[in-house]
Amino acid sequence: MKKYVLILVVSAASFSQSVMAQEITLKAGALGSDWRGNGINVLNTLVGVTGKFLSRSPYIGYYGGATVSIPVSEQVSIEPGLIYSQSGTSLKGELGLKGIDFLNINASASMVQQRIEMPVLLKADLGNGLQLMAGPQASYQLASKLRVQAGAFGFNLLNRSIDMSNSFEPLNVSAIAGLQYNLPNGLGIQASYEHGLTSIMKDRSAKVYTQSGRVGLSYRF
């Protein structure tokens, strides 16, 4: 854990020191996120039901924040940033709640995490406004909430939001890779993939990792 705290501190220091003198870029967009590992079993346990979900789908969230560009050479730069994101995973299907299994209750559950992300990306200019980017990212959990909804015969039987922050590690590390296309007027289009490197669960027996695909716009000052 100490090395992850160090990564977070170094990322924050790099960002704050470079903001005052370098090029600033605002970024925002949508993301589709999911869990790897035994995330389905973990989420079923958190919901506290006995039935099984029939299908799994990514959670659609969003992100927004700012980065700064620190030139290393004419073609290469380092880009630290501060990003707010909402990510997680979703499950939908039929549940068997104890005592009322015969109702065939349709339910959905989503585990939503609000995070502050601190990426430190290496960017290489490929020419004609196209850039390749890759690097590590440290994330700090602001909140984690489990949202459960269930209904049968048109009636809403369950609608709960539960704070699950204590079940998750506050700090996580992931790797990011992607492409960005910059227009001459400062606008940009970017697509990236995040791959979690450390388990997000405090329970050491549960190996659960985040992953997300992101598409967004940017504006360079």
Image (cartoon, rainbow, N blue to C red):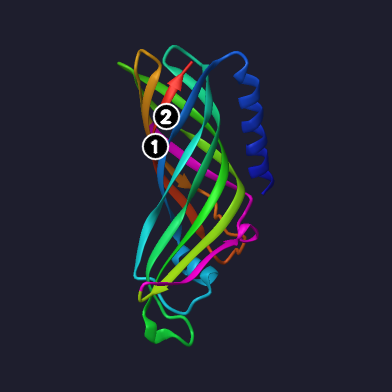
* Secondary structure category for the residue under label 1: strand
Camera-side residue of 83 and 201: 83
The residue under label 1 is 192
The tally of labels here is 2
Q: Position of residue 47 (x, y in %)?
A: 52, 70
* Secondary structure category for the residue under label 2: strand
Q: Residue furthest front?
A: 155
Of the residues shown, which amino acid type is indicated by label 1? Answer: Ser
Disc number placed over residue 133 in the picture, else none? 2
Q: Does residue 151 appear left or right of residue 68 in this picture?
A: left
Residue drawn at 36 percent across, 80 percent down: 104
Instruction: Determine contact: label 2, label 1, CB under 8 Å.
Output: yes
Q: Position of residue 83 (x, y in %)?
A: 54, 35
Q: Position of residue 17 (x, y in %)?
A: 65, 21
Residue drawn at 63 percent across, 16 percent down: 20
Nearer the observer: mark 2 or 1; the answer is 1
Badge 1 density bin: few <14, some 14–19, many ≥20, Cα 10 Å: some
- Which stretch did the figure color magenta? 154-178
Say which label, 2 or 1, has the lower sequence index: 2
Q: Does residue 161 appear left or right of residue 213 in this picture?
A: right
Q: Position of residue 191 (x, y in %)?
A: 36, 34
Camera-side residue of 101 and 200: 101
Residue drawn at 34 percent across, 70 percent down: 54
Q: Residue furthest left?
A: 128
